[in-house]
């Protein structure tokens, strides 16, 4: 599209929709008009892509995820359509800043964090690699809560992201389907002697899909992310005459559950899981039937991937549809199901593995529960005589009156993968070891990845321009080419320009910090960043202990030569996770104490930015100098902010956990600060039961002073929270070994302080991080999924044949 065409199209839409001239339109009208224009451009490609998949009958993957976290889509869509610069200039010609209208768009925050964002990076990469893939999820009316701080406490507000409508989606009523919940099931004998399950007293709800185009990077491909919303079916209207009854139905897709152990038993969550699974499976079957192929070809045309166990009911639901609705026998249906399905595990924390009480399953999804019982029965039967009885009992689906969803996912699929090398190894060796002995061939690793289109090209234009200048633009299509930057390690001009680009983004973030918190930060300070959900195992608290150490150091020795540092946090705590909320309160109170103490001469500042989300991440990450990846070794499955920060030239301070291990291998020991217990040492402590945080405390005067600050009034206004944290570290023996890792962490921080003073040395490390970040491109990750697990091919490869 030329600039002139863009301008004309925009003018037309502003006139038709708002009766406005381009010159008189405000950011809201401009955003919606531009959004419509973008949609029109992409719809043509979307239609073509879909036609092509249909006529070529290519195998497709359906990525089932109860969370998607795309953030804003305007600039990403413009970039991928290849018209970002033209649109930017067209607007600029009329005196409009594209950033101003892009800011109008609400973040699509239908996810909690890593898992949901991974799904959205994958959607971008699958389309950009020309792979036939679809997302399947839930269109929540309210996304993840908005976070505010009041008196340093987290307060949650609803996220009304749909208030002004969503330009990107298309409601497809014609593709709606019915989902049955509750009631009971009995077996009816048919004339031919077969048993047919019949539902009674069921609640039938309508699942209406809203499709959003997932636009590939300048390749003409547009895939589909399909999100389901619940409605009351017209035929059932009469049944819902009072509002409370209607509400119970409408509640089904009203809110995203925050990652939150207290809420896990909730009936509505289980109903949500079944709702989007059933609707998704039904629409796959409908598509497959259009192809007019025999059932045994199903897995040659369809791959179904489940993102964690939340969609694990895909196993019994596919069985149900094949048997109950299409007359296949158990063995045939089971063979198809296992061949079609694959599963990704995202956690090794036992308490995070999903289990549902049997009584709840019976109540909410009675037919699905019957099938689960039968899967369990047949599993036990098939393993007897092959494996020891205790192993069979430990791996079956039904135990302790609960359904173990991970067991269902592993037994009912052909592939189980972890999300980083160390994580996949731990799954095999410890967490899922029993299953590994039974199905060794099903286990594999797929290290997570990120899309550098969003996390570099869009979020960091200054850095992108430096890259273009020195290594050319090929990295934009092929992120592995970031490696070319290594040729310039000793080129002082390049190092200077990289530093300059970082400074630009630091100044922008400093402005944002000033606007949102009223705190001034210096751009020559180290910007030290920890951005992730608040969880005890991620150890934001250890970061705080280090900050307190610096605080006391400066108080004792005001003349001390410390490199100025700004500690930046972004983190939401699950609403009922009270320990995490206490940590937020204590960080906020410490921040206030430090930021208002002029005797510290601005040497350290602590900034806790509220409402961390994708858009805020795009502001923080390009400005970061230091990336905090300090989880207790073995606990963080992968992490992905570690990859985004590395890509933007931040240097990582890290434990050997998750993908940090592979980041270390990629950049080399001299370009990362590794500290702390290894995963083996952590497991040794578990085995020997010989950890004593009290002992460490007693032998370390400095640590005593730091911990005492939580209870002796040093940190103000934290009587309750300070005590809770103090007790967790001493009375309850410090579950995540903060005190054990503290000294080593401090040493790593001291090396950072020193190294930063030598800008060229630092910038060289930074360069090595940018150059090696291509290894963590989600493009590479999804290609590995496509080849090893899904057996799907790029559309180009297919049409060329
Ligand atoms: C489950 C049941 C009921 C309510 C909520 C949940 C729930 C919701 C979200 C459970 C887990 C999650 C999210 C998990 C998650 O984000 N895990 C992260 O996944 C990333 C992508 O693989 C990894 O990089 C992180 O290490 C991992 O913590």
Image (cartoon, grey):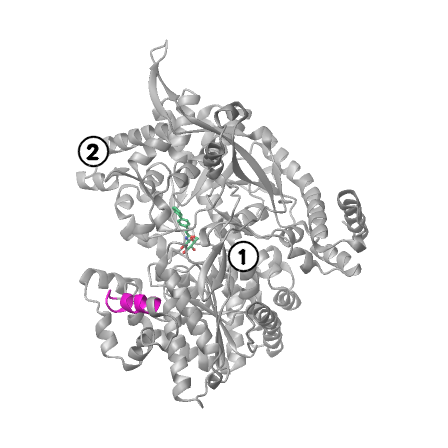
Q: Circle 1 is placed at which residue position?
A: 614
Q: Nearer the viewer, residue 783 or 257?
A: 257
Q: Is residue 522 magenta?
A: no
Q: Which mark is residue 746?
A: none
**Mark 1 in CB contact with mark 2 (< 8 angstroms):** no
Query: Dividing the picture into quarters, in which one does residue 305 lie?
Result: top left
Q: Position of residue 582 (x, y in %)?
A: 37, 64
798 to the left or right of 391: right
User: Tag on residue 384?
Assistant: 2
Quarter assignment of residue 295: top left
Q: Residue 362 lies in what quarter of the image?
A: top left
Q: Residues within 10 Å of mark 2 (few under 14, many from 20)?
A: few
Q: Where's the C terminus, which quadrant?
A: top right
Q: Nearer the viewer, residue 210 or 412?
A: 210
Query: Do we see residue 99 in this rendering?
Result: yes
Earlier sequence position, callout 1 versus callout 2: 2
In this picture, which residue range is highlighted in magenta? Answer: 721-733
- Tell me if residue 659 comes above or below residue 441 in the rendering: below
Q: Is residue 185 left or right of residue 212?
A: left
Q: Give x and y (percent) for residue 255.
A: 48, 45
Q: Residues within 10 Å of mark 1 (few under 14, many from 20)?
A: some
Estimate the x, y position of residue 732 in percent, counting from the top left: 24, 64
Q: Residue furthest bottom?
A: 559
Residue 341 appears left or right of 379: right
């Amino acid at each position: 599209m030329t600039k002139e065409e863009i301008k004309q199209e925009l003018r037309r839409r502003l006139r038709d929709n708002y009766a406005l001239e381009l010159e008189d339109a405000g950011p809201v009208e401009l955003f919606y008009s531009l959004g419509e224009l973008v949609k029109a451009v992409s719809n043509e490609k979307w239609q073509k892509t879909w036609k092509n998949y249909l006529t070529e009958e290519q195998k497709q993957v359906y990525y089932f995820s109860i969370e998607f976290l795309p953030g804003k889509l305007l600039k990403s869509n413009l970039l991928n359509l290849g018209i970002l610069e033209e649109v930017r200039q067209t607007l600029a010609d009329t005196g409009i800043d594209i950033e101003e209208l892009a800011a109008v768009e609400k973040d699509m925050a239908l996810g909690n964090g890593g898992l949901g964002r991974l799904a959205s990076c994958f959607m971008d990469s699958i389309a950009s690699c020309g792979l036939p893939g679809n997302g399947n999820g839930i269109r929540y009316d309210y996304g993840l809560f908005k976070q505010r701080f009041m008196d340093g406490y987290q307060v949650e507000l609803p996220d009304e992201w749909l208030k002004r409508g969503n330009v990107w989606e298309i409601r497809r009523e014609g593709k709606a389907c019915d989902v049955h919940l509750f009631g009971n099931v009995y077996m009816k004998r048919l004339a031919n002697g077969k048993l047919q399950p019949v539902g009674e007293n069921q609640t039938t709800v309508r699942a209406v899909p809203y499709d959003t185009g997932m636009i590939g990077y300048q390749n003409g491909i547009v895939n589909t992310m399909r999100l389901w919303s619940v409605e009351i079916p017209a035929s059932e209207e009469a049944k819902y005459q009072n509002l409370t009854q209607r509400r119970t139905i409408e509640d089904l897709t009203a809110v995203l559950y925050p990652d939150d152990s207290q809420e896990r038993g909730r009936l509505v969550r289980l109903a949500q899981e079944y709702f989007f699974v059933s609707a998704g499976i039904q629409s796959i079957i409908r598509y497959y039937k259009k192809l007019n192929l025999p059932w045994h070809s199903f897995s040659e045309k369809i791959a179904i991937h489940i993102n964690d166990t939340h969609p694990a009911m895909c196993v019994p639901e596919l069985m149900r549809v094949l048997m109950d609705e299409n007359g296949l026998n158990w063995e045939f249906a089971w063979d198809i199901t296992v061949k079609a399905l694959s599963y990704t595990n995202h956690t090794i924390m036992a308490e995070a593995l999903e289990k549902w009480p049997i009584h709840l399953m019976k109540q909410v999804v009675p037919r699905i529960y019957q099938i689960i019982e039968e899967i369990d029965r047949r599993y036990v039967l098939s393993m007897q005589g092959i494996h020891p009885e205790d192993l069979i009992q430990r791996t079956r689906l039904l135990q302790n009156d609960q359904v173990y969803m991970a067991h269902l996912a592993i037994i009912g699929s052909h592939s189980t993968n972890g999300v980083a090398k160390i994580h996949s190894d731990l799954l095999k060796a410890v967490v899922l070891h029993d299953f590994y002995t039974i199905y060794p061939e099903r286990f594999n690793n797929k290290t997570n990845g990120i899309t550098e289109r969003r996390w570099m090209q869009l979020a960091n234009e200054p850095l992108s321009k430096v890259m273009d200048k020195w290594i050319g633009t090929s990295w934009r299509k092929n992120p592995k080419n970031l490696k070319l930057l290594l040729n310039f390690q000793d080129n002082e001009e390049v190092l200077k320009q990289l530093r300059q680009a970082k400074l630009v983004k630091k100044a922008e973030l400093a402005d944002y910090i000033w606007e949102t918190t009223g705190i001034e930060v210096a751009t020559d300070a180290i910007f030290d960043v920890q951005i992730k959900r608040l969880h005890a195992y991620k150890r934001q608290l250890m970061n705080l202990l280090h900050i307190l150490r610096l605080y006391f150091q400066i108080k004792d020795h005001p003349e001390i030569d410390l490199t100025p540092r700004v500690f930046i946090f972004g983190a939401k705590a699950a609403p009922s996770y009270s320990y995490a909320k206490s940590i937020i309160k204590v960080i906020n109170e410490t921040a206030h104490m430090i930021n208002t103490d002029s005797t510290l001469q601005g040497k350290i500042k602590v900034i806790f930015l509220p409402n961390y989300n994708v858009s805020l991440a795009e502001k923080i990450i390009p400005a970061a100098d230091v990336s905090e990846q300090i989880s207790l070794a073995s606990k963080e499955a992968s992490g992905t902010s570690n990859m985004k920060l590395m890509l933007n030239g931040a240097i990582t301070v890290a434990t050997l956990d998750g993908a940090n291990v592979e980041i270390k291998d990629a950049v080399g020991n001299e370009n990362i600060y590794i500290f702390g217990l290894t995963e083996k040492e952590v497991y040794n402590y578990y085995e020997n039961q010989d950890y004593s945080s009290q002992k460490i405390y007693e032998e370390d005067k400095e640590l005593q002073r730091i911990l005492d600050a939580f209870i002796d009034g040093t940190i103000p206004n934290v009587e309750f929270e300070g005590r809770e944290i103090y007790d967790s570290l001493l009375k309850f023996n410090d579950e995540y070994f903060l005190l054990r890792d503290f000294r080593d962490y401090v040493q790593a921080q001291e090396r950072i302080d020193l190294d930063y003073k030598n800008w060229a040395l630092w910038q060289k490390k930074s360069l090595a991080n940018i150059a090696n970040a291509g290894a963590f491109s989600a493009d590479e990750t999804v290609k590995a999924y496509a080849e090893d697990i899904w057996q799907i091919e790029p559309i180009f490869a297919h049409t060329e044949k």
